[in-house]
């Protein structure tokens, strides 16, 4: 969830948050409007925090009031005084006056604001507008000021660090070797590899398959519905990844290239599209691919079922 102005109050306190809020408004409006400028804060600023336009013509004035909690009588007086100060300035003419506050107004506050706005617009022929927290946050995010103001860059960095740690955890996960008494020579996935002229690195493919089988048995033995569903979703995603490449593959004899492409995509997308709450290594995800082959739902050449049949007949 994105942070809002309450975060400023919690981090900087009531006093410190004022300058940060004003800075956020200044950066947002000057990014949004090419002719927006800020006025240096001093007793002679004539009630301007930000303005849009040129002093040779009537300008738009933006006044930032750091009202986090309420708009009571004290705050209403400040609003009236700021408007009057800008309206009666001899240094410029004003066509629009905007109030910026880091909160959403209550019904009672909005009733007062609407009445005051309507009265003064009619009396002085000046447009009056409210930028509450929602409008300001939309403008701030649109111009990417939130990354700095709300420390979103820091949060994104922490997210990246977490992702790195997750990768490290997967890399450190123990990958078991296939027991000597385990023979996969006649398993469908192994025969399918050989029928597609994929005969090198069989020890690696056997290890991937073996570890995927261990993973499956572990999940099934715990019998946690959410984990079982998560593993199924992962398996379905890997099968869809295979299907996309298989539909574009034309070779009916050699499957080395197709297997290489799928393995590469598993590596590339392991922490994004193939991310899972389960602790599953890249090797195990590749092993799931061989599980699917063992179920004869994926293959490495075009018309892989017919190719396997011909291979078995020759054997």
Image: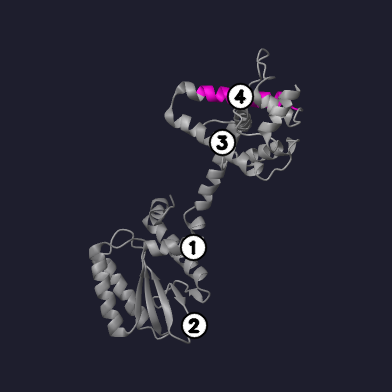
- Is residue 56 placed above or below 314 in the rendered structure? below
Q: Nearer the viewer, mark 2 or mark 3?
A: 3
Q: Residues within 10 Å of mark 4 (few under 14, many from 20)?
A: many
**What is the x, y in percent for residue 180?**
68, 13
**What is the x, y in percent for residue 286?**
63, 32
On the picture, is 139 further left or further right than 259?
A: left
Q: Locate the C terminus by quadrant.
A: top right
The answer to whether the residues at label 2 and label 4 have Cβ atoms under 8 Å apart is no
Q: Which segment is the magenta one?
A: 201-218
- Which quadrant of the view contains residue 62? bottom left
Q: Which residue is mark 2?
A: 54
Q: Which residue is mark 3?
A: 166
- Which quadrant of the view contains residue 172? top right
On the picture, is 200 further left or further right than 237?
A: right
Q: Which residue is mark 1?
A: 142
Label 3, secondary structure: give it: helix
The answer for how far apart the CA atoms under marks 3 and 1 are is 31 Å
Q: Residues within 10 Å of mark 2 (few under 14, many from 20)?
A: some
User: In this figure, what is the number of numbered marks?
Assistant: 4
Rendered image coloring scheme: one colour
**What is the x, y in percent for residue 168?**
60, 34
- Which quadrant of the view contains residue 116? bottom left
């Amino acid at each position: 969830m994105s942070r809002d102005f309450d975060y400023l109050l919690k981090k900087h306190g009531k006093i410190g948050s004022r300058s940060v809020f004003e800075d956020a408004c200044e950066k947002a409006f000057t990014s949004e409007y090419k002719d927006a400028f800020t006025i240096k804060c001093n007793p002679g600023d004539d009630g301007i925090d930000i303005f849009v336009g040129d002093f040779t013509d009537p300008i738009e004035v933006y006044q930032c009031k750091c009202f986090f909690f309420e708009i009571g009588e004290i705050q209403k007086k400040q609003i009236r005084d700021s408007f009057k100060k800008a309206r009666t300035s001899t240094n410029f003419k004003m066509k629009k006056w905007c109030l910026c506050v880091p909160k959403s107004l209550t019904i009672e506050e909005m009733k007062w604001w609407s009445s005051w706005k309507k009265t003064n617009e009619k009396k002085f022929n000046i447009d009056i507008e409210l930028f509450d927290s929602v409008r300001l946050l939309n403008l701030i995010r649109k111009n990417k000021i939130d990354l700095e103001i709300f420390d979103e860059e820091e949060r994104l960095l922490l997210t990246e660090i977490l992702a790195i740690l997750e990768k490290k955890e997967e890399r450190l996960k123990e990958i078991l070797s296939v027991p000597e008494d385990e023979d996969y020579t006649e398993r469908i996935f192994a025969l399918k590899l050989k029928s597609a002229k994929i005969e090198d690195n069989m020890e690696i493919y056997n290890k991937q398959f073996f570890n995927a089988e261990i993973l499956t048995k572990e999940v099934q033995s715990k019998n946690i519905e959410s984990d079982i569903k998560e593993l199924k979703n992962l398996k379905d995603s890997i099968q869809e990844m295979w299907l996309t490449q298989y539909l574009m593959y034309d070779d009916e004899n050699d499957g080395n290239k197709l297997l290489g492409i799928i393995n590469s995509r598993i590596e590339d997308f392991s922490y994004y599209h193939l991310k899972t709450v389960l602790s599953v290594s890249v090797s195990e995800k590749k092993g799931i691919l061989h599980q699917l082959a063992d179920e004869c739902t994926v293959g490495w050449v075009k018309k892989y079922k017919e190719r396997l049949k011909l291979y078995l007949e020759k054997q």
